[in-house]
Amino acid sequence: MSPRLRLALFLTGMFALTAVAAVLLFAVGDRTVRTGAFEGALRPEIPVEDFGNLRDEDGKPVRLADLRGRPAIVTFLYTTCKDTCPLTVDQIRGALDELGHDVPVVAVSVDPANDTPRTAKRFSLQRQMTGRMRWALGSEAELQRVWRDYGVQPQTTDDEHSASTVLLDGEGRQRIGFATSVLTPRALAHDIAELEREQSDGG
């Protein structure tokens, strides 16, 4: 066999191996997508404590136990915010609309000095979330434990609050986190649906 023929056969074999490897890689990647990878950032599956003495805008207790049995959204907002908070809530509303049904949504105050039942109701009305989102309001001392549980920086005169939205699973565990900068209705709806599917499968 001539050296030229051996080289041609070698190159043909290498091209064939590369093609097979590409097909296998594509198949594995495709299977990974179909099994339902989450769009948001995975968080440690930490069971969180209840909300303590926090109350909603109607003065009713906000209890984590009331959220269990299905996924829930916990987000961190303040009622006088003009930029990230309205955007966050609009994205959440879009996700619920895309999903086709509501899940519990709790907006935890990060500015207790200025977040009141009245301002909370006004914010929800302006964002078209009345009846679809409850606020968790309280004193700074009452809210600090919740901020700590979720790793959230509250709003201060010097620092912006953590623009964070967290998905809880049906057992009340933190599962998925979204920064407002990457939160989209499609991604949030997708991850809620994945958690619902997991719950129905007994996962």
Image: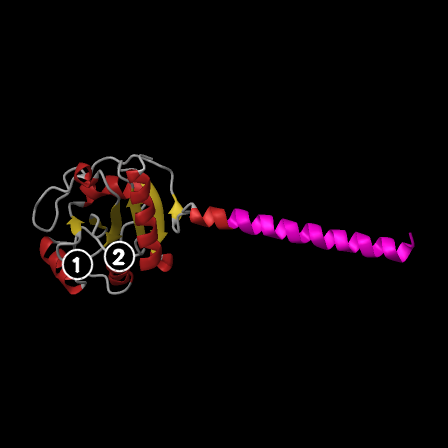
Residue labelled with disc 1: 129
Out of 131 and 154, give the one closest to the viewer: 131
Magenta-colored stretch includes residue 24:
yes
Q: How much space separates mark 1 and mark 2, taking CA atoms?
A: 9 Å
Chosen colour scheme? secondary structure
- Tell me if residue 13 comes above or below residue 66 in the rendering: below
Residue 103 appears at what percent x and percent y?
22, 49
Out of 33 and 182, give the one closest to the viewer: 33
Magenta-colored stretch includes residue 103:
no
Task: Say which label, 1 or 2, has the lower sequence index.
Answer: 2
Identify the residue shown where x is 30% and y is 51%. Answer: 165
Residue 163: in sight, yes or no? no
- Tell me if residue 116 comes above or below residue 201 in the rendering: below
Residue 9 appears at what percent x and percent y?
81, 53
Badge 1 vs badge 2, beta-carbon distance below 8 Å:
yes
Q: 153 left or right of 128?
A: right
Q: Which mark is residue 92?
A: 2
Quarter of the image with the C terminus in it? top left
In which image quadrant can residue 53 be found?
A: top left
Identify the residue shown where x is 42% and y is 45%. Answer: 35
Identify the residue shown where x is 92% and y is 54%. Answer: 2
Secondary structure state at the residue bearing disc 1: loop
Outermost residue, right direction? 2
The amino acid type found where label 1 is placed reads Met
Q: Which residues are magenta?
A: 1-29
* Type of secondary structure dominating the magenta stretch: helix
Out of 104 and 55, give the one closest to the viewer: 104
Using a 10 Å C-alpha cutoff, classify the residue at mark 1 as few (fewer than 14 neighbours), some (14 to 19) or many (20 or more). some
Residue 26: in sight, yes or no? yes
Q: 119 left or right of 110?
A: left
